[in-house]
Image (cartoon, grey):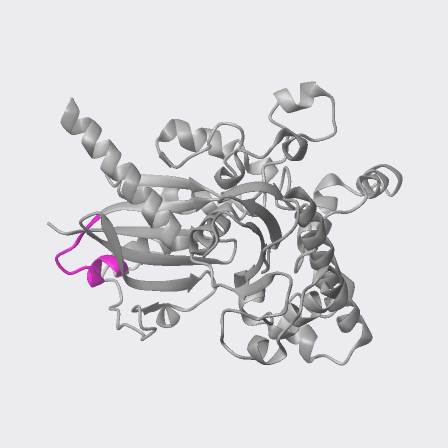
Amino acid sequence: MPQAILAINAGSSSIKFAVYVIAGSELSLICRGILDHNAADSQFVIRNPAGEILPTETSSNPSSDLTRSLIDRVERLLGSNELAAVGHRIVHGGAHFHAPVLVDSGVMQALDGLTPLAPLHQPACLAPIRSLLSARPQLPQIACFDTAFHRDLPPIYRRLPLPLEFEKQGLCRYGFHGLSFEYIARCLKRPDGRTIVAHLGSGSSLCAIRGGRSVNTTMSLTPLDGVMMTTRSGAIDPGLVLYLVKSAQMPASAAEDLLYHKSGLLGLSGISADLRALLASKETRAREAIDQFCARAAEQIAVMATSIDGIDTLVFTGGIGQNSPEIRKNICTRLGWIGLSFDDDANAGKGETISTPESQFEVLVIPTDEESVIARHAFEIVRQHRQAQQDR
């Protein structure tokens, strides 16, 4: 029977997904979509590869469990294709998970234990797995880690400036958005070049890539570090946290809420975490928040360049990086001093290249596709697992 792979990319407020049919050694996309946790049933949308909305029937066994509802609807679209496995994006793999892995109870327990390092993301990533382990225990599930792409960071960029005993406890710089960076690395025309990828979205980070491998990245032990984001502070003086907890007597939970949910663009502007709303606003604080977001990103592009001895290609990706010409222009304008020559017309259009021929390095806009990376990893794990069973 022809088989299919479902890739699930679960966030704190939505589930992105894509379904691929296995065709020999290749995967062919048949549909993708997004399910908002707050959306009504009638707003559930699945699109084919051309972007056209596919009709889906309401489940005959309605469930409040979004994952089960998703599986039910997807299977109605598969026809004669059998669902062979489900791949999941997991934000934090910690010190032990450096590659995709077939999920069992032991893996789940270990991943649950990493929740304090990614409290905003890890529970949302694990919820669909937990649901399917209960509803479909025989369906193979594969965990794919955002941290895995950064597993070979050089020691100078991996180690925190703390005593060695803390590193032995697994406290080091892990990096995130690895599935996105892996996809972009595969798309590069110059895979051996010096590339900086700016994944800008509700969560934002940058990565310095050389020879297809991560050399340095802005996020660290947790997805809270690095450039400022829509509601996350990014890098701040660690003394601020000590002051809030010790001198201001702020409970640790309140400090966590402040830094994860009330800072960044939202905190600076006092208006919104949505960049589109800030760009449309005439308020001074909105403009200041935007400018700080862009200044921090430009600053880190220069920092990343020191990790790989320069830059041949700069790539913008992620929801903001892909879709906001204004933000790309603001950032690129700050990089003229290192030889970036910017093409306004190309940036305003839909082209991939937004630098001029005279630029010292190329600037590209490449939409990311984490779901395709998840599906490819899941397919490989299933193939290996079946081969191992046949060899027994």
Q: How many marks?
A: 0
Q: Position of 187 compared to 324: left or right? A: left
Q: Residue furthest front?
A: 358
Q: Is any atom of residue 233 visible in this view?
A: no
Q: Position of residue 168 (x, y in %)?
A: 62, 20
Q: Is any atom of residue 156 visible in this view?
A: yes
Asked which quadrant contains residue 170, the reply is top right
Q: Position of residue 6 (x, y in %)?
A: 30, 52
Q: Position of 132 compared to 194: left or right? A: left
Residue 169 to residue 340: above or below: above
Tell which of 20 and 350 is nearer to you. Answer: 350
Residue 192 to residue 367: above or below: above
Over which residues does the magenta segment extend?
A: 74-83
Q: Position of residue 13 (x, y in %)?
A: 51, 58
Q: Residue at x 54, y 71 (%)?
A: 323
Residue 64 to residue 364: above or below: above
Q: Position of 384 compared to 373: left or right? A: left
Quadrant including the C terminus:
top left
Q: Is residue 79 magenta?
A: yes
Q: Residue at x 70, y 42 (%)?
A: 253
Q: Is residue 19 magenta?
A: no
Tell which of 378 and 304 is nearer to you. Answer: 304
